[in-house]
């Protein structure tokens, strides 16, 4: 159950950062074209996409992680193609998807 709280905390932080970026503060974040961000994460950190979702405003939210989980990066890509790094860290763990009756 601890991992549920950790995921919730990461998502809440991401949405808070997303709000700031979408409000016009993208100049404070690490932003570039989606291709450039993906290439940098692949070449510099051997990170690949491990999860993604679509935000209500049409932005793509992606989690990239190294195959060994050593590093991870949360990226938001706006509909116009600008990608911004929202957060990054270490020790990513992938959890299995729970059935609807297992979620509390």
Image (tube, helix red, strand yellow):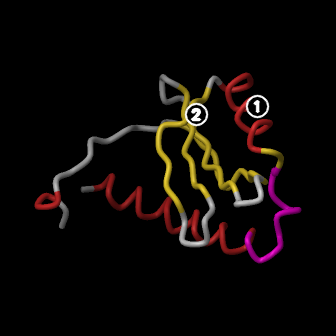
Q: Is residue 31 above or below residue 55?
A: above
Question: Which is nearer the eye, 4 or 80?
Answer: 80
Near mark 1 (Cα within 10 A), the count class, few <14, some 14-19 or many ≥20, is few
Horizontal relation, residue 52 to residue 99: left or right: right
Q: Is residue 24 magenta?
A: yes
Identify the element where label 2 is drawn.
Answer: strand
Query: Taking 3 as reference, is 91 left or right?
Result: right
Residue 92, given in percent of the width and then of the height, sits at 47, 38
Furthest-right residue in view?
27
Residue 29 forms part of the magenta stretch:
yes
Residue at image mark 2:
71
Q: Position of residue 56 (x, y in %)?
A: 54, 72
Q: Is residue 42 above or below residue 87?
A: above
For marks 2 and 1 on the same chain, the one whose residue lies earlier in the sequence: 1
Residue 36 rendering spot, x and y as whole percentages = 80, 36
Q: Quadrant of the C terminus?
A: bottom left
- 36 over 15 or under it: above or below: above
Q: Nearer the viewer, residue 89 or 79?
A: 79
Q: Quadrant of residue 28?
A: bottom right
Q: Which residues are magenta?
A: 22-31
For label 2, the crowd category at 10 Å Cα-Cα, with few meaning under 14, some 14 to 19 and many 20 or more, is some
The image's mark for residue 62 is none
Name the quarter where the N terminus is drawn.
bottom left
Q: Label 2 vs label 1: CA separation?
A: 13 Å
Mark 1 lies on residue: 40
């Amino acid at each position: 159950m601890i991992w549920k709280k950790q995921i919730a905390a990461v998502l809440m932080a991401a949405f808070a950062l997303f709000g700031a970026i979408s409000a016009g503060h993208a100049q404070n974040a690490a932003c570039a074209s989606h291709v450039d961000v993906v290439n940098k994460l692949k070449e510099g950190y051997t990170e690949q996409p491990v999860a993604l979702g679509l935000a209500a405003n049409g932005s793509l939210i992606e989690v990239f992680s190294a195959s060994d989980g050593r590093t991870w990066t949360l990226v938001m890509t706006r509909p116009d193609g600008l990608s911004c790094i929202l957060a990054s860290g270490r020790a990513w763990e992938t959890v299995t998807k729970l059935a609807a009756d297992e979620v509390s």
